[in-house]
Amino acid sequence: MNRRVRAFAVVSAAAAMTICASNLLAGPAQPAADAPQPTPPPALHLDAAPVYLADEPPPAPEQTPTEETPERSLLNATLYKSSFGQQLIDKGLDIGGWVEGSYTYAFSNPPGGFIAGRVFDFESQDPTLNQIVLYAQRAVAPSGDKFDIGFRAEMMYGSDARVIHSNGMNFYGSSSPQLDPNNQFDLTQAYVQFNVPVGTGLVATAGKFVTLLGYETINPNGNPLYSHSYLFGFAIPFTNTGVIGAYNINDKLTVTGGITRGWDQSTEDNNDSIDGIGQVKWVPTEKLTLILSGIFGPEQTDNNHDWRNVIDGIATYAATDKLSFALNGDYGWEAGASSTGGYAVWYGVAGYTGFKFSEYLAANGRLEFFNDDDGTRGIGTTVYEATVGATVTPFPKSGVAKTLRVRPEVRYDWAAADVFDGGTQDNQWTFGVDALWSF
């Protein structure tokens, strides 16, 4: 079973050190003022996931920041006050981060406080420090005029790090994954980027990066709700390590492709094979964005012939400046991966809607089903969930506190079999809330 399946029952652990990149002060390529600003890899999918809940929210760290990003980062604003810091920011340096804490309550009081089917919020009645993240980056914009170099280094500390460790970055004991310590370190992303001035500009990314697949993200700033979907937790990888390239065919169409070491593999690999990863992003109108991604290759330990394949689709539609919709679907298949050793298939769809009442308050909802009848993703049945939540931004105009958001939610899960509460119930109710502050 892969790392995501193990996270369903027990969480792994690891840690790593952050990196730095060269040529920090190299001048960035400046596109024309009226040129489109597509999102370079490795997270071309994230700008399709609107954060409904905040007026000018801080940029998601997986997203490449725009020129306004230094003004939105509290750390950059502080750094800009010195002449040296001003030079760094003028050359494209972006330093920032966020802190997230949460609390989840399961009304059924499951054995051991373990909430089945969850990713980061699986501990009932346990105040949690989810993430303290610090990142430094220099974004690279696609350009056909000038060679440019950038980087990103992103380090996490908190309970969420236990779940997302990649293979080879486990300083907590790779032979026997454990829940303790609750708070761990993780090097979530570490990559360099190059703009090669061919055509409209080819942006190449090399290193460890968040996967191209999926609507929801590890970074809580990129998600409309606190809890995560089954698709995020069980259908796709968290991160990939490899080399990919992105090319803007025109201002509406971007293609990305490359090779990686596999699902959540980094300095070590569980087999001797690579996989292929790709994405096509089309923006036919200002309101509609369509993204199709896929990953294909052997993923089982010491098995180079049974391929795991996933196709991921995303559609987002901004009906008005207040009302947004999104749809995410996944279909995966793998030979020799079912609970009986046979051919396995998994698939699911999640729909989202969000409405912004004011700069202080917004509401979001998610409705989802996920089928894992073959048992390869660790659930072994079909599950459904409905989640409604709000985001309160109490101080949207108040300096340091303007990025603070509080997101309460109520979630109902039900299944075709008794998989909740230690295998005794086919449904569960939970209440969750997180507080998220970006700096």
Image (tube, rainbow, N blue to C red):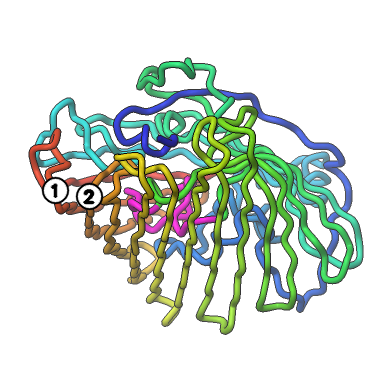
User: Is residue 276 visible in this depiction of the protein?
Assistant: yes
Q: Picture coordinates of residue 161 (x, y %)?
A: 46, 31
Task: Examine the residues drawn in magenta and state their main secondary structure.
Answer: loop
Residue 354 appears left or right of 22: left
Secondary element under disc 2, as helix, strand or loop, is: loop
Secondary element under disc 1, as helix, strand or loop, is: loop
User: Quarter-wise, where is residue 376 in the image?
Assistant: top left
User: Quarter-wise, where is residue 25 in the image?
Assistant: top right
Quadrant for the C terminus in the image: top right
Q: Picture coordinates of residue 13 (x, y %)?
A: 46, 24
User: Is residue 78 visible in this depiction of the protein?
Assistant: no
Residue 38 appears left or right of 176: right
Quadrant for the N terminus in the image: top left
The residue closer to the viewer here, 69 or 247, is 247
Query: The residue under label 2 is which amino acid type?
Result: Thr
Residue plotted at (45% across, 62% down): 51
Q: CA distance from mark 1 to mark 2?
A: 6 Å
Q: Which mark is residue 417?
A: 1
Q: Which mark is residue 226?
A: none
Magenta segment boundaries in residue numbering: 213-231
Query: The residue under label 1 is which amino acid type?
Result: Ala
Residue plotted at (52% across, 47% down): 307
The mark nearer the N terminus, 1 or 2, is 2
**10 Å neighbourhood of mark 2: few (<14), some, or many (≥20)?**
some
- Seen as rendered, the residue at the extreme bottom is 285
Residue at which label 2 appears = 381
User: Quarter-wise, where is residue 245 in the image?
Assistant: bottom right
Residue 196 appears left or right of 57: right
Q: Is residue 283 above or below residue 331?
A: below
Mark 1 and mark 2 residues within 8 Å of each other at the beta carbon: yes
Q: Is residue 407 magenta?
A: no
